[in-house]
Image (cartoon, rainbow, N blue to C red):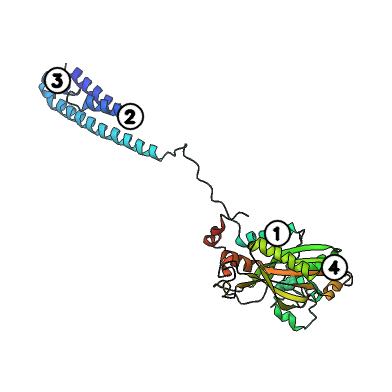
């Protein structure tokens, strides 16, 4: 008789140890069955009286084990359920919208260069490019800088050998175009140029230019003015006015520097235009006949105009940047500010 009761209790113990739950309802059923006020262990305690005296102690211990196991099994099942719930929280919600990828942005120099190119494209100017490492002929001599002429000092040069240097302007590209093409020539040369200058907020040893050239019969200074007036209005707004100041470049005669009316104050005077109402944006002039001849173009028949501007300078004006250095530092915080500019 005793053994049967023992077997029943052992069976119960195995049942508790093997018990599994998948959800909180099943856990509650476990609690009711083994720990609740009418739990199934209770009648087994009552069996004590049917146990032979010599085995009563053993049965009592078994019943204690049963009770403790029920409690610890309950705790373990509850923990497991809670952990499972916590794990479920980490499962990504696949119905959520996707995070937009971080998009890159165009460099402000590329933005402004593209705008300049686009404006001159509309006037029929085509892009020409040439080497950044240039010989003396294309960078200087053909452009009417005689050897040892002090004008060479206008552009502090990085020399590689006596004859080879980093180009100081993209006028060198225009020499190459004139050497190979017959007028009419309408070209713009965007590109990087180098000058041996101390780096400061206002100057850098590398920067970008867009230079333009128009050679044909009867090209006049009036054509130059109208072309650059169109450019200024397209770039800086329809109310922009221009003025020319006499200047000197070896490769142009006559030479001028062009200012635009300040697009910030409209000419009234502000810190951008240093209270003059005007800001300088480019150099220009009629191509010196010597340059045309150096490139094999008949200067009796053809005339031309040329101009050149610094892209950094225009970008600094346009975006009100007071220091040239960030253009070359690749600081993502600087570059990200142009993410919304798309043209
Ligand atoms: N090449 C000149 C410079 O680098 C700019 C310029 C181009 C001036 C064409 C006049 C005509 O400063």
Q: Is residue 92 left or right of residue 19?
A: right
The verdict on label 3 being within 8 Å of ligand 1 is: no
Q: Is residue 232 visible?
A: yes
Q: CA distance from mark 3 to mark 4?
A: 125 Å
Q: Quick one: label 2 or label 3, which is nearer the N terminus? A: 2
Q: Quick one: label 2 or label 1, which is nearer the N terminus? A: 2
Camera-near label (1 vs 4) is: 4
Is 133 rendered above or below residue 60?
Answer: below
Q: CA distance from mark 2 to mark 3?
A: 33 Å
Camera-near label (4 vs 2) is: 4
Camera-near label (3 vs 1) is: 1
Give the image quarter of residue 26. top left
Mark 4, residue position: 218
Q: CA distance from mark 4 to mark 2?
A: 93 Å
Mark 2, residue position: 23
- Most foreground residue, 55 or 126: 126
Q: Quick one: label 3 or label 1, which is nearer the N terminus? A: 3
Coordinates of residue 45 in the picture (x, y in percent): 14, 23
Tell me whether circle 2 and circle 1 mark residues in contact (CB < 8 Å).
Answer: no
Residue shown at the point (16%, 20%) measured from the top left: 43
Mark 3, residue position: 47
- Most foreground residue, 282 or 58: 282
Q: Is residue 211 left or right of residue 8?
A: right
Badge 2: residue crowd in 10 Å (few <14, some 14–19, many ≥20): some
């Amino acid at each position: 008789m005793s053994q049967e009761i023992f077997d029943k209790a052992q069976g119960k113990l195995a049942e508790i140890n093997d018990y599994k739950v998948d959800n909180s309802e099943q856990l509650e059923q476990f609690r009711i069955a083994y720990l609740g006020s009418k739990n199934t262990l209770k009648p087994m305690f009552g069996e004590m009286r049917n146990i032979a005296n010599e085995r009563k102690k053993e049965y009592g211990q078994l019943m204690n084990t049963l009770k403790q196991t029920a409690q610890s099994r309950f705790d373990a099942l509850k923990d497991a359920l809670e952990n499972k719930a916590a794990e479920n929280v980490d499962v990504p919600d696949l119905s959520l919208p996707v995070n937009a990828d971080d998009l890159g942005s165009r460099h402000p120099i590329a933005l402004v260069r593209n705008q300049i190119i686009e404006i001159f494209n509309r006037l029929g100017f085509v892009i020409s490019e040439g080497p950044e490492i240039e010989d003396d002929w294309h960078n200087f001599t053909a452009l009417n800088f005689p050897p040892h002429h002090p004008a060479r000092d206008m552009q502090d040069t990085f020399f590689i050998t006596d004859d080879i240097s980093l180009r100081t302007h993209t006028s060198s590209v225009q020499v190459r175009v004139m050497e190979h093409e017959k007028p009419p020539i309408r070209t713009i040369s965007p590109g990087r140029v180098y000058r041996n200058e101390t780096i400061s907020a206002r100057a850098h040893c590398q920067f970008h230019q867009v230079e333009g050239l128009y050679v044909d019969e009867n090209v006049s200074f009036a054509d130059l003015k109208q072309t650059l007036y169109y450019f200024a209005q397209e770039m800086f707004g329809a109310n922009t006015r221009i003025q020319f100041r006499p200047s000197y470049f070896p490769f142009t005669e006559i030479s001028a520097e062009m200012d635009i009316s300040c697009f910030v104050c409209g000419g009234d005077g502000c810190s951008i235009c240093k209270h003059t109402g005007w800001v300088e944006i480019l150099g220009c002039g009629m191509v010196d006949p010597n340059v045309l001849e150096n490139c094999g173009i008949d200067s009796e028949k053809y005339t031309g105009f040329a101009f050149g501007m610094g892209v950094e300078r225009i970008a600094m004006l346009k975006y009100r940047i007071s220091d040239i250095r960030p253009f070359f530092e690749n600081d993502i915080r600087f570059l990200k500010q142009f993410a919304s500019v798309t043209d």
